[in-house]
Amino acid sequence: MCGRFTLTSTPEQLAQRFGLDEPPQAAPRYNIAPGQDVLAIRVDAETSRRVAAHPRWGLVPSWAKDAAIGARMINARVETVVEKPAFRGAFRARRCLVPADGFYEWATRHGRKQAHYIGLRDGAPFGFAGLWERWVDPSGGTLESCTLLTRDAVESIRAIHSRMPVILEPAAYAPWLDPALDDPARLSALLQAPPEAQIVCHPVSDRVNDVRFDDPACVAPAPEKPRQGAMF
């Protein structure tokens, strides 16, 4: 599962990394949470160029009766995304990149939960594999939303959590965004875990648990929580 992430890279860095014609609107964010708008990169059907969008995190299928379903659709498992009615159409035709430079996971240790911040060793921004949808409400208004794909965690993350978001290699960006590619097997082959050596992580404070906090203190290293009942 992925329930929080960060995006603190500059718009210029993002434009270069993701092949955008111009820098996107992207202020530094240290505690992005479900239900909030996120930056997403997709291919414009008319121009075939990569463009920035800002869908809500929590996918609302086009057939949904209520947008509230999005709260349960923040992640899609790679093992079932091809079959699940909520995701299979988007997997074939509405894929996106969701830029990030780190994410949070929580480990339960000594009876307490400890938040950890996870990113790549070089600190560069990367693209989560995402899906997006457009939903029309009963009054005719539209809502664009997205979900992040998750897979089994690499070994270094597994001690914290069994799942992790799919971090696409830069070479996979073009085929993942290609609207002409709709073969599930070829798409699934892109959803690999990054090399173990690229992953770094460290414990952080409980500050990230509160969505009201969105500042550099969220990612600052913190000591592991002591065992309950430990003597100091």
Image: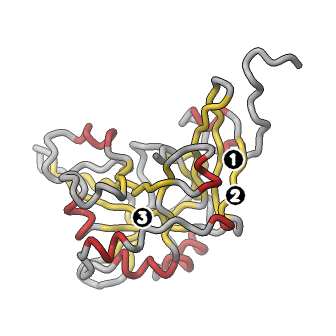
Q: In percent of the image, x 23 and y 41: which residue is there?
A: 67
Place residue 55 in its image quadrant.
Answer: bottom left
Q: Residue 133 falls in which quadrant of the image?
A: bottom left
| Relative vertical location of residue 123 with respect to residue 80 in this rendering, above or below | below
- In the rendered image, the quadrant that contains the C terminus is top right
Q: Secondary structure at mark 3?
A: strand
Which numbered circle lies on residue 200? 2
Q: Which mark is residue 129?
A: 3
Q: Indicate the position of residue 195 as horizontal and vertical percent values.
A: 61, 69
Residue at mark 1: 219
From the viewer's perspective, tell me whether residue 129 is left or right of residue 91: right
The answer to whether 56 appears left or right of 98 in the picture is left
Q: Residue furthest front?
A: 155
Q: Which residue type carries mark 1? A: Val
Q: CA distance from mark 3 to mark 2?
A: 19 Å
Q: Mark 3 or mark 2: name the one nearer the start of the chain.
A: 3
